[in-house]
């Protein structure tokens, strides 16, 4: 997806939006995006600095949906062509050819996921529960702590004598 190289510094909002989509799909790699788009590296770095600080300008944001659609549509075509070629070559191909085409499919799939905001990585969390003996020890310690806290609280409670107050203790009583 090479944008036409411009001799002057006038880039349209559409050009900036296309560069933004390409930059995101390249995992925010400025040099790679510059090579693929034809936009000078320093120009792209200047834009990226602004995008990182304030996000894309409103005019570029307005162009993003169309540019994302174009990029994803093109990437889907390339991925499909690679898959068709892979299927065609399977019977007679060497392993090197198949792995190169499979790599293209994987790269295009990653770029599509990045451009559309889908996850590109999956994290699996494995939690291991304590053994039965460890649980007994933990729960025993927990119960001992509760009993100790209750005993401390009982020791801290001060016994007081409760005296009943007379019904009228000098306060003004209204009679109705």
Image: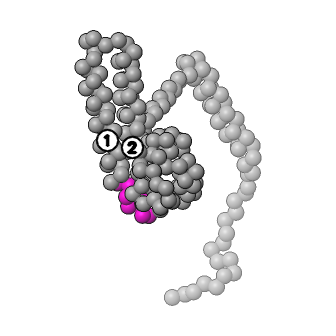
Instruction: Mark 2 and mark 1 in contact? Answer it, CB < 8 Å.
Output: yes
Magenta stretch in the rendered image: 58-65
Secondary structure category for the residue under label 2: loop
Whether residue 7 sits left or right of residue 90 in the image: it is: right
**Residue 53 on image: x %, y %:** 57, 57
Secondary structure category for the residue under label 1: helix
User: Overall secondary structure of the magenta stretch?
Assistant: helix
Q: Nearer the viewer, mark 2 or mark 1?
A: 2
Q: Residue furthest bottom?
A: 176
Would you say residue 21 sits in the magenta stretch?
no
Residue at the (51%, 88%) spot, across then down: 176
Q: Quadrant of the N terminus?
A: top left
Residue at the (37%, 34%) spot, across then down: 108
Q: Which mark is residue 1?
A: 2
Report crowding for label 2: few under 14, some 14 to 19, many 20 or more residues within 10 A (C-alpha): some
**Of the image marks 2 and 1, the number of the one nearer the N terminus:** 2
Mark 1 — residue? Answer: 74
**Residue 64 on image: x %, y %:** 38, 55
**Picture quarter containing residue 115?**
top left
């Amino acid at each position: 997806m090479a944008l036409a190289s411009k001799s002057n510094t006038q880039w349209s909002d559409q050009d900036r939006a296309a560069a933004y989509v390409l930059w995101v799909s390249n995992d925010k790699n400025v040099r790679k995006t510059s090579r693929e788009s034809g936009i000078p590296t320093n120009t792209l770095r200047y834009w990226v600095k602004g995008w990182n600080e304030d996000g894309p300008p409103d005019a570029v944001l307005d162009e993003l949906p169309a540019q994302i659609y174009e990029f994803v549509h093109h990437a889907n075509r390339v991925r499909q062509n690679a898959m068709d070629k892979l299927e065609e070559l399977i019977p007679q191909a060497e392993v090197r050819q198949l792995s190169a085409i499979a790599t293209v499919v994987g790269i295009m799939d990653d770029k599509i996921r990045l451009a559309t905001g889908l996850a590109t990585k999956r994290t699996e969390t494995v939690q291991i529960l304590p053994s039965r003996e460890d649980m007994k020890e933990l729960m025993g310690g927990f119960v001992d702590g509760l009993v100790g806290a209750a005993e401390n609280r009982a020791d801290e409670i001060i016994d007081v004598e409760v005296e009943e107050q007379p019904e009228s203790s000098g306060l003004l009583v209204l009679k109705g």
